[in-house]
Image (cartoon, rainbow, N blue to C red):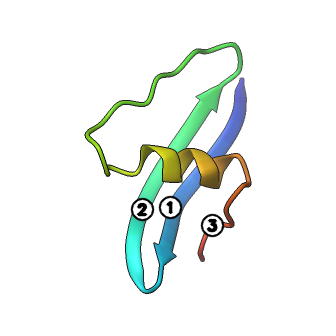
Amino acid sequence: MKLSVEQAIEKAIDDFSILKGIDLVVEKGSIYGLIGRNGAGKTSLIKCITGIWDIDE
């Protein structure tokens, strides 16, 4: 069962694209980890999918 589906997440700050075309499916009862280099956009992605930041369209 899918709990959340986010398609083509995009976010820009001051005309600089920080997230582009991110697709995400979260299955109910699953545990996920998000890893990447410094500045890769991990925190930005979490802020977008939790509603702290609005997703650009």
Residue that numbered label 1 is attached to? 8
Instruction: Give the spatial CA distance, label 3 vs label 1.
Output: 10 Å
Decide which of tag 3 and tag 1 comes sooner along the chain: 1
Q: Amino acid at mark 3?
A: Ile
Within 10 Å of disc 3 (Cα), the crowding (few <14, some 14-19, many 20+) is some
Which quadrant of the view contains residue 57? bottom right
Residue that numbered label 2 is attached to? 21
Which marked residue is nearer to the observer: mark 3 or mark 1?
A: 3
> What quarter of the picture does the N terminus occupy?
top right
Q: Determine whether label 2 and label 1 are within 8 Å by CB.
A: yes
Spot occupied by residue 29 in the image (x, y as percentages of width and height): 69, 13
Residue placed most toward the observer, 39 or 51: 39
Q: Amino acid at mark 2?
A: Gly
Residue lying farthest to the bottom in this orientation = 15
Residue that numbered label 3 is attached to? 55
Residue placed most toward the observer, 23 or 10: 10
Instruction: Give the spatial CA distance, label 2 vs label 1.
Output: 4 Å
Within 10 Å of disc 1 (Cα), the crowding (few <14, some 14-19, many 20+) is some
